[in-house]
Amino acid sequence: MPTPLRSAHWFSGQSRDGFIHRSWMRGYPSDLFDGRPVIGICNTWSELTPCNAHLRQIADRVKSGVYEAGGFPLEFPVMSLGETNLRPTAMLFRNLASMDVEESIRGNPIDGVVLLCGCDKTTPSLLMGAASCDVPALVVSGGPMLSGHFQGQQIGSGTAVWQMSEDVRAGKMRLQDFMEAETCMSRSAGHCMTMGTASTMASMVEALGMGLPHNAAIPAVDSRRYVLAHQAGRRIVEMVREDLRISKILTRKNFENAIRVNAAIGGSTNAVIHLIALAGRVGVPLHLDDFDRLGHHLPLLVNLQPSGKFLMEDFYYAGGIPAVVRELGDLIHRDALTVNGKTMGENTADAACWNRDVIHMLAEPLRENAGIAVLRGNLAPNGAVIKPSAATPKLLKHRGRAVVFESIEDFKARADLPDLDIDERCVMVLKGAGPCGYPGMPELGNLPIPPKLLTRGITDVVRISDGRMSGTAYGTVVLHISPESAIGGPLALVENGDDIELDVEARRLDLCVSDDVLSRRRAAWKPAPPAGTGGYQRLYVDHVMQADQGADLDFLVGCRGAAVPRESH
Ligand code: FES
């Protein structure tokens, strides 16, 4: 006699409670309550999250697959985080959305769940919430947009915006062309089609084994995206019958695979924070230094913006993540289990590469030692990160004078002034962009280059902050400095004119000021009033952990399981 599924605790039996649970579920034949797997389709569809606006259609195809396999699909909405619209930053709400997902799964008659996500934070929030319940789960990403095209050139989400806005500020691009490009970049449904955070996290889903092969790169409007969704619906029913829960897939090996794939694809620095937070939910020890130790020495294989040239559509046609995994050979744990019940090695054994300009061979990479580097020093005792593949090589070892901005408002007020005291050797410093300080750790770290430098042809200087940067951005940008300035991290003590030394090869980030001077500054330092005065922001500021620990809320770490022993009536 097989063990009843958790949905049977709602839908079976002839008690008053069973009557209530079934009776209000209108319009379904009675036999759908016969003990078959109930599959939740966790949907981040929202018109305010344009990257996910097509997910209702994707959900329909998942439902078809679930029905075919003998399951009972039920779609439910969760908080949707749109990167382009949400203020002060979508990252502030990642943990809140994960709570929504976790409690929605646990509180409802769900045996397994398909997670529909796309825009940056929607992927980690759904994974984190589902992981804390530990039910069978499978991710279907919405897929990237078609490539942008403008004046005969491909333009990539985000990356082109940063480039063109600096060209306008430098007087190299006409404002009317800039405005025209706005209508040429986002051509279809889907998320950013550069290797930004959304594409990175969709790739992490595949590398973690949480999605079907090719989940990351099939364009949102390609018919094969709908086939994948259909197959996912079939597969999740089997996963419930096999009791293939998230904890059986998200093992240390799968996280190590994700770190290595992230290095090879030139993935976003945001993956560091999201993977550490996700590992915390399933109890897998994962440390900031793992990203450097496992990933930094790996070469960049994938030639996609912002580290390279092409876009996600090109990546899919070239072979996508399976081709990268195969190319990485023994650097990948080939016995790591994935949601389709096969190992990573089995899934990628025959993966072909169709375009070596897009996916390079390991023997002929696009760039050596391109994985994320973790820096330490008296400016970042608990660590900071830099993405060397997106940086200017000659700036990776640099000493320069600090030009300090106490907040992003301070930066916006002064950056364009002709008398700003800055030259190409300076280090731009932004404070107040950490988890507590903003709050929410916004993507401000890639500070725009002041026009005073742009007009002289200088397009990159070293920039450091306790914030994050968009995965679509580039430059010699040190991020995630921990502890952050708002809680008194050493970044708070930096003053204009101090020397700062960056040495990526030595993994150092140092403030070249004596300990005596720093002690005096620390004694005089006063924290700013807390940013959030009530509501969720208060909860967040009181409980958020620092970037090196994944910026999760401390009370959300861990798996709480799916059991709910008490009835609702
Ligand atoms: Fe949604 Fe980039 S803004 S993925």
Image: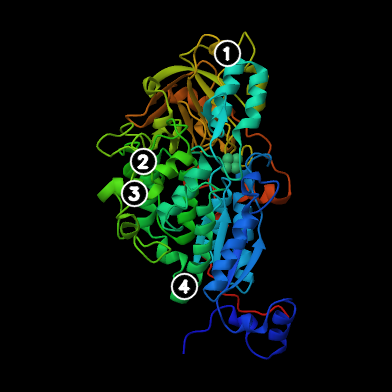
- Report if the beta carbon of the residue with label 1 is closer than 8 angstroms to ligand 1: no
Q: Which residue is mark 2?
A: 264
Q: Which residue is mark 3?
A: 325
Q: Which residue is mark 4?
A: 238
Distance of label 2 from label 1 (alpha carbons): 33 Å
In front: label 2 or label 3: 3
Q: Which residue is mark 1?
A: 172
Label 2: state its secondary structure.
Answer: helix
Q: Quadrant of the C terminus?
A: bottom right
Q: At label 1, which amino acid type do we have? A: Lys
Q: Earlier in the sequence, mark 3 or mark 1?
A: 1
Q: Earlier in the sequence, mark 3 or mark 4?
A: 4
- Determine the quadrant in which ligand 1 lies: top right
Residue at point 57%, 35% (across, down) = 443
Label 1 crowding class (10 Å Cα cut-off): few <14, some 14-19, many 20+?
few
Residue at point 48%, 41% (across, down) = 313
Q: At label 2, which amino acid type do we have? A: Ala
Picture coordinates of residue 358 (x, y %)? Answer: 38, 36
Label 4 crowding class (10 Å Cα cut-off): few <14, some 14-19, many 20+?
many
